[in-house]
Amino acid sequence: MGIQGIHPVLREMAAIFHEQGKQVFLVGGAVRDLLRGKAAQDWDLATDALPGEVCALFPRVVPTGIKHGTVTVLFKGRALEVTTFRTESDYRDGRRPGQVSFAATIEEDLSRRDLTMNAIALELPSGRRVDPFDGAGDIRNRIIRCVGKPGERFAEDGLRPLRALRFAAQLDFRIEEATLAAIPGAIPTTAKVSAERIRDEIDKIIASPLPSRALRPMEATGLLELLLPELTRCRGVEQKGFHRFDVLDHALLACDYSARTGAPPEVRLAALFHDTGKPACRRLGEGGVWTFYRHEEESARLSAAILRRYRYPNAVRETVCRLIAQHMFHYTGDWTDAAVRRFIIRSGEEHLDDLYRLRLADIYGTAGLEPPPDCLLPLTRRVEAVLARSRALSLRDLAVSGRDLMARGIPAGKRLGLILGELLEAVLEDPALNEREKLLEIAGRLNKR
């Protein structure tokens, strides 16, 4: 679909509006994507038809935001948001307008939008462009600029400064100077935005090709201190050995690496937060060298607090914190097979690949250099070999169960749990013991003892 090649579904919808003498325009991100030569993902429409009139035009309409003039039309297998031309005013909570008024023209509607690149409309079905703020020129010049006065736009909606920085990371655009300069003044308004909306923007930032394109200006404007103070405390915390950067720059590089290499969101979050505990754990050791003993535990604790603050799902929080807690492993060739099995258990077999990805990002962040391609190969091969010989890594993998032991006279309770734990330890040391009769014999001796 191009500027002059409107999709047939949109043509059909436009024809229905036109039959009733109504205008309809494609607006928002779809227009921005088309002007960048990209495929449009979501189709949002603006019209001079009132919500009730839109409902009368189509048989299947969901009143998703009818109070503010928005309905969702289900048409030809697609769900399209249709909003009546409107203006907004009286922003009271830093996010939503207290008053919405329907407007007469598309130009009035576009004037309420946040950024010039989002304030362009394409008339349907002709494709005629309506661009009162030269958003197309800003897209061509890769510039992010507010519609009108940046301070006013940001004062209306505290999420807009974060959205502007997120777009900079997503699109590799430059933020225009006046727009960037207005962000610090909007921080009190941003502080009112809900945790869920902030989380959504954080997710989009770390999903961008280079998250630091947003995170660095967030630090410079004060947004990072507001939203993620655990990271700003890492600024100026110098490190030892091969580290070329302070803790914050190290974390940003690690996050960029995980994004560049296509790591899943949990790894990107872990890369960003994996050393947040270092400022609290830093101690001056012998020879004037800074140490960060057990910083991974403090980092996992702080990361759990961040993820709870922004209402991340429990599964995401648990995965991120496990990765952070285990990222300081130091494999050497003299590890026994039992030590490898315990490493697998601590890490979680299902998390091993992500833990390797986090380690590579951590290595990259040390000096900004690509990790040697085979740096983890000795460990990964060893893990694969150990798993090939035995996958008895938990109580459920044992050849006997608690019921088997109770049938041999061992009562339920603490003693039973202790004996099962001892059996697992024995099998971790020697997988050949994981046979029913052998384990029953060992359990019997433990019970007598």
Image (spheres, grey):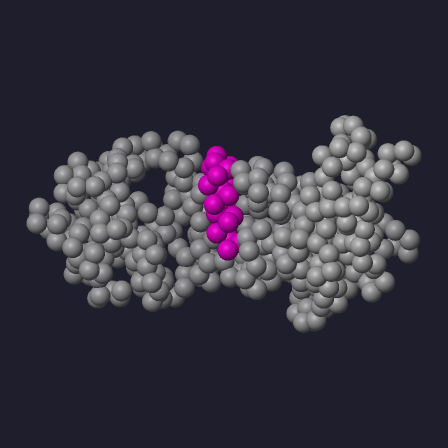
In the image, 172 versus 38, the foreground residue is 38
Residue 387 in the image: state x and y as whole percent.
71, 59
347 within the magenta span: no
In the image, 436 versus 112, the foreground residue is 436
Viewport quadrant of the N terminus: bottom left
Residue placed furthest toward the bottom:
373
* Residue lying at 35% horizontally and 64% vertically, measured from the top left: 38
Up the image or down, 134 lies above or below 285; here it is below
Write down the quadrant of residue 280 in the picture. top right
Up the image or down, 337 lies above or below 161; here it is below
- Most common secondary structure along the magenta stretch: helix
Up the image or down, 360 lies above or below 58; here it is below
For residue 333, side relative to residue 304 (left or right): right
184 within the magenta span: yes
Viewport quadrant of the C terminus: top right
Number of numbered discs present? Answer: 0
| Residue range corresponding to the magenta coloring | 182-207
* Residue lying at 79% horizontally and 54% vertically, measured from the top left: 431
For residue 432, side relative to residue 213 (left or right): right
From where the camera sits, is residue 274 visible?
no
Residue 39 in the image: state x and y as whole percent.
33, 63
For residue 365, side relative to residue 312 (left or right): right
Residue 21 in the image: state x and y as whole percent.
8, 47
Write down the quadrant of residue 336 in the picture. bottom right
From where the camera sits, is residue 375 visible?
yes
* Residue lying at 22% horizontally and 49% vertically, measured from the top left: 75
Residue 164 in the image: state x and y as whole percent.
44, 52
* Residue lying at 53% horizontally and 38% vertically, measured from the top left: 311
For residue 86, side relative to residue 56 (left or right): right
